[in-house]
Amino acid sequence: APSDGEGSDASGDYSSEEVSGDEGGATLSERREAKLQQMRNELEEKKRKSVEEGEAAEALRLQHLEEANSAISLMPSVKRKKREEGGDKPAMSLIANLQGQATPTHEFSKDLNMGKENSSGTVVFPTSSDVASWTPPDTASNPADEALEIQLPDFDSLRLQEGSSNNTIAIKFSAPHESKRFSINIAAPGHRDYYDILFHFNPRARQKGGQLVINDKQEGIWGSALEVPLSTLPLMFGDHACTLVIQINGDGFDIFLDGEHCARLEHRTQLPKEKCSLTLQFPSTDDYGSPEVWTVYRVWWGQKPSMASGDISGVPGVNMYSSLHPKKLFVSGLSKLHSLPEVELRRAELERAFRKYGGSHGVAVVCPMNATYAFVEVEAERQADLALQEMASKYRLNRARRTKHEALQEERAAVEAANQGKLQETSEW
């Protein structure tokens, strides 16, 4: 290794060469700067050539496009019809134009007989001439943020079958092509900020190729959704206005879109026993804060005869499966469970309380953690009926809903039992 003195000499020689450089005519730093400048010039030249080549290619492309356009200028063209900017009136059919019978965007068809006021109902939105329509605000951050809520008075479930209670909601709306989804909710009194929802209607244009999702919510938990492909329904997204009609009857909620019976959500929750007002909500966003894009022009509420006619067995949701389990009870209104010991105590309590309805095998009890409800399965349907009558004073009881999975399991078990020539009881426990 060189000594400190040798290293100092080397450094001094290098510095003297850089500073003096008389013999070479230029210092080392000058030569380096000249080399860098040469490289910069070469790089600038390459950039200039690249720009020139790009401009030449773009000019050639434009020339080809002009030649192609001139070649097909005599051919007929087909253009997609679009609503003009700022316009809210959809294009009318040729026949409607000729006959002067086109329905305005903000009005229902005259065939529906849903004027502002008539003997069977009334327009509940808009209620003043100052408001023409409603669109979810862009600033909304949750479903309830500036949502549209409408009261639906004089609903009496006991008089539905008699045809003397309000039972029909009609909504005139439009959803543009770029809309991904929109929704409505119908809730009974005491819904606790829509913790309980009787009926949920939610077209989703981007889910599984387009799906109409119909559901309910109990105790803050969504039920088993009924999903209908949008391809099988009248068009809901586009440059036109649609009429949605929802009829409440003894079987469930019947859904009609532009006169076509699209689906039915069978009742999953007991309707209010007394005369009351239902609440119709138009949320501003979905549960995750994503905006809902559509426009509501008019809402009508009143009494109409059932629009369901003929054979409706092919309508989605009609007799798809029984929504009530014959032997399972839903016990609600219980205290919330926070630990496994509390779960065991709750299970033991319910097993003792419902023991006589379980036969020789006893009852089967499920108590979910962090829940305020439980499920009790008894021996047979008759025992379930007795339990509903005799235990109603002690517990809040209802028939438990049967899931589609349970229905399929029972159907398969029934087929197997029939093949074996015997009656077979089924249970999920």
Image (tube, grey):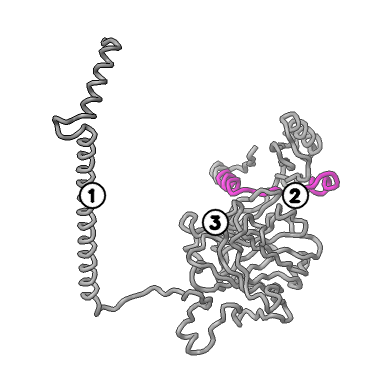
Q: Which residue is disc 3 drawn over?
A: 227
Against 196, residue 137 (above or below) is below
In this rendering, is residue 211 above or below 219?
below
For this rendering, which residue is in front, 257 or 177?
A: 177
Q: Which residues are magenta?
A: 386-414
Q: Indicate which label's residue lies in the foreground, 2 or 1.
A: 1
Q: Which residue is mark 1?
A: 44
In the figure, is residue 216 to the left or right of 205? Answer: right
Nearer the camera: disc 1 or disc 3: 1
In the visual, does 412 lie left or right of 354?
A: left
Residue type at tag 1: Glu
In x, y percent, where is residue 278? 74, 64
Of pointers 1 and 3, the one earlier in the residue sequence: 1
Residue sitting at x 68%, y 77%? 130
**Which quadrant holds residue 378?**
top right
Residue 137 part of the magenta-drawn span: no
Q: Residue furthest bottom?
A: 99
Whether 343 is drawn above or below 69: the answer is above
- Secondary structure of the residue carrying numbered label 3: strand
Packing grade of label 2 (10 A; few <14, some 14-19, many >=20) is some
SS label for mark 2: strand
Q: Give me the C-alpha separation between circle 1 and circle 3.
A: 62 Å
Q: Where is mark 2, residue-wise? A: 398
SS under mark 1: helix
Task: Answer whether labels 3 and 2 touch (C-beta < 8 Å).
Answer: no
The part of the image, by quadrant, that contains residue 213 is bottom right
